[in-house]
Image (cartoon, coloured by chain):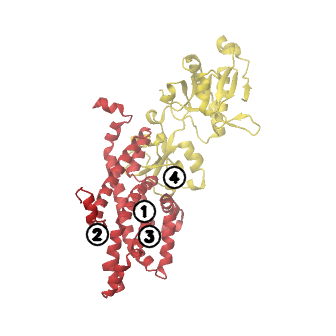
């Protein structure tokens, strides 16, 4: 297994508590989920998750070691103490919370509606009343669309690709999906030229969960809270924005933290 | 009651709560299936006659059509009509687009109709060709023209003999109609998949859909059994006096 050590600045180590400074913090990462986590041609890890992990370590003034782990073994490896935290775009869900604990979210790509640029209606429950909204079946968006737009006709598709295809053909008036996916695989392409986001972000704990957080073992409240505080700090000082802008055209942090 | 239900690993409350949606799904399925069977059946009659009489021009054309539609899956045919035709600007700007091809329901009806018409044509052609020589010769001997022979002897006889095979076509068409759910229609399976997707269930929606299809097939089977008893009585094997004597059971 490839291991890579990132040494953070040593200058302020004296400020850290002795317990925290003792061992390097081992962070499980995936390395196969671009643009969040991937390998450069020379084998070094790169991506949004990787840079966020590094920035958090710098913020917490801890030595960090990134440990590569395949996705399906991520939680067992955390529980088996192979590493102490997971920074791998893991969504905070109730089911996982039974196994592990999560920091506050560090990003949450919100759902957004997409419609024709000249749609002539608003992305509100009233504006979409009687309109046809396409969503992928079984996705969190089906839950949200039916809850949020009860007067619209929710049209279900097997794949997100089919949703975009029928949006182009005009069989649906709007579609609801992950904003990042909509941007990367539709709006930035030729097919999406006459389309745009309609209205703002849609966030909903019941349907969408609480965003993507950093996983730690249960009972490690100290580490969890330190990570949450570090996330807030890099949001504050602009480090997050700098990393974000390297990869994405808009702020993927989403709205306020879901726990507020 | 509560205790008995809890042993069944199904969320029956959710199914019951959404049963009106399933009933609407039954309506969509039945109306698509039987409209397609009706229109497809009517199209099949002239095509079967043209095929059976080996019409010089029409026969090869119809043969090609049935060959293509029987040789490709219904799902592919439906996708080609629903997604394929929409790729052409010419079609999107034509009068066909707005009321017809832009609607999933019409696309499904067209695909199902063309599909069942192809199968029914070949089925009926077989029945026409198989008409016993005696019946045809008797018709010729009594001075029937080709047209009146077809209308009064061959077709009624062929229709009757096609009933058992056609019951299969009806059931296949009903089962094939699940394809509608892949192009966004809320037929029985569409509602089942909606339920699964909405509540993150694994099989509640599928089991409910399966039961509903099963019930419909049961009704179709009964209906065809009645039709066969009524219209195929003359073909039923009669008990010979010798067989009746050996078998004390009363005969029907």
Have a look at marks 2 and 1 and say if they share a chain.
yes
Have a look at marks 4 and 3 and say if they share a chain.
no
Identify the subunit bearing mark 2.
Answer: B
Nearer the observer, A170 or A12: A170
Extreme right residue here? Answer: A42
Q: Nearer the viewer, mark 1 or mark 3?
A: 3
Q: Residues within 10 Å of mark 3 (few under 14, many from 20)?
A: many
Q: Which residue does the numbered mark 4 point to in the structure image?
A: A162
Marks 2 and 1 in Cβ contact (< 8 Å): no
Q: Residues within 10 Å of mark 4 (few under 14, many from 20)?
A: some
Instruction: Name the quadrant containing residue B97.
Output: bottom left
Chain drawn yellow in the picture: A
Q: Is residue A98 above or below residue B138?
A: above
Q: Which residue does the numbered mark 1 point to in the structure image?
A: B112
Marks 4 and 3 in Cβ contact (< 8 Å): no
Report, in whole angstroms, how far the alpha carbon at label 4 lies from the one at label 3: 35 Å
> At x 50% / y 44%, what residue is drawn?
A177
> At x 65% / y 23%, what residue is drawn?
A82
SS at badge 2: helix
Report, in whole angstroms, how far the alpha carbon at label 2 lies from the one at label 3: 24 Å
Is residue B204 shown left or right of residue A201? left
Q: Which residue does the numbered mark 3 point to in the structure image?
A: B122
Extreme left residue here? Answer: B250
**Precedes in sequence: disc 1 or disc 3:** 1
Q: Which residue does the numbered mark 2 point to in the structure image?
A: B234
Q: Is residue B199 above or below residue B169?
A: above
């Amino acid at each position: 297994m490839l291991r890579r050590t990132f040494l953070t600045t040593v200058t302020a180590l004296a400020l850290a508590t002795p317990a925290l400074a003792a061992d390097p913090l081992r962070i499980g990462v995936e390395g196969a989920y671009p643009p969040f986590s991937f390998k450069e041609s020379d084998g070094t890890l790169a991506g949004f998750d990787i840079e966020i992990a590094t920035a958090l370590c710098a913020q917490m003034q801890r030595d960090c070691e990134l440990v590569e782990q395949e996705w399906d073994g991520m939680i067992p490896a955390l529980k088996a103490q192979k590493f102490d935290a997971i920074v791998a775009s893991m969504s905070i869900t109730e089911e996982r919370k039974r196994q592990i604990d999560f920091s506050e979210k560090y990003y949450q790509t919100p759902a957004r509606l997409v419609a024709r640029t000249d749609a002539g209606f608003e992305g509100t429950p009233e504006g979409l009343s009687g309109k046809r909204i396409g969503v992928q079946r079984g996705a969190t968006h089906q839950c949200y669309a039916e809850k949020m737009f009860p007067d619209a006709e929710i049209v279900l598709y097997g794949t997100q690709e089919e949703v975009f295809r029928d949006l182009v053909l005009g069989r649906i008036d709007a579609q609801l999906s992950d904003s990042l996916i909509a941007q990367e695989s539709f709006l930035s392409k030729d097919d999406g030229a006459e389309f745009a986001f309609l209205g703002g972000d849609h966030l909903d704990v019941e349907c969408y969960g609480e965003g993507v957080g950093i996983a730690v073992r249960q009972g490690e409240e100290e580490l969890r809270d330190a990570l949450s505080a570090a996330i807030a700090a890099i949001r504050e000082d602009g480090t997050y924005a700098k990393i974000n802008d390297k990869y994405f055209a808009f702020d993927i942090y989403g709205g306020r933290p879901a726990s507020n | 009651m509560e205790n008995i239900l809890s042993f069944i690993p199904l969320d029956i409350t959710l199914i019951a709560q959404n049963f009106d949606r399933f009933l609407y799904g039954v309506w969509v399925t039945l109306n698509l299936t039987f409209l397609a069977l009706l229109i497809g059946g009517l199209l099949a009659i002239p095509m079967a006659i043209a095929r059976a009489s080996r019409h010089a021009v029409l026969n090869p054309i119809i043969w090609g059509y049935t060959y293509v539609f029987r040789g490709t899956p219904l799902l592919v045919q439906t996708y080609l009509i629903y997604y394929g035709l929409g790729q052409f600007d010419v079609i999107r700007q034509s009068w066909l687009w707005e009321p017809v091809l832009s609607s999933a329901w019409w696309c499904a009806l067209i695909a199902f109709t063309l599909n069942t018409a192809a199968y029914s044509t070949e089925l009926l052609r077989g029945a026409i060709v198989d008409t016993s020589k005696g019946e045809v010769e008797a018709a010729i001997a009594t001075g029937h023209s080709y047209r009146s022979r077809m209308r009064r002897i061959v077709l009624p006889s062929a229709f009757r003999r096609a009933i058992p095979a056609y019951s299969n076509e009806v059931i296949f068409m009903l089962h094939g109609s699940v394809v509608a759910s892949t192009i966004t229609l809320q037929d029985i399976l569409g509602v089942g998949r909606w339920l699964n997707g909405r509540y993150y269930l694994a099989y509640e929606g599928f089991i409910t859909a399966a039961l509903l299809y099963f019930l419909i097939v049961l009704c179709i089977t009964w209906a065809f059994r009645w039709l066969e008893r009524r219209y195929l009585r003359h073909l039923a094997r009669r008990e010979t006096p010798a067989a009746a004597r050996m078998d004390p059971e009363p005969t029907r």
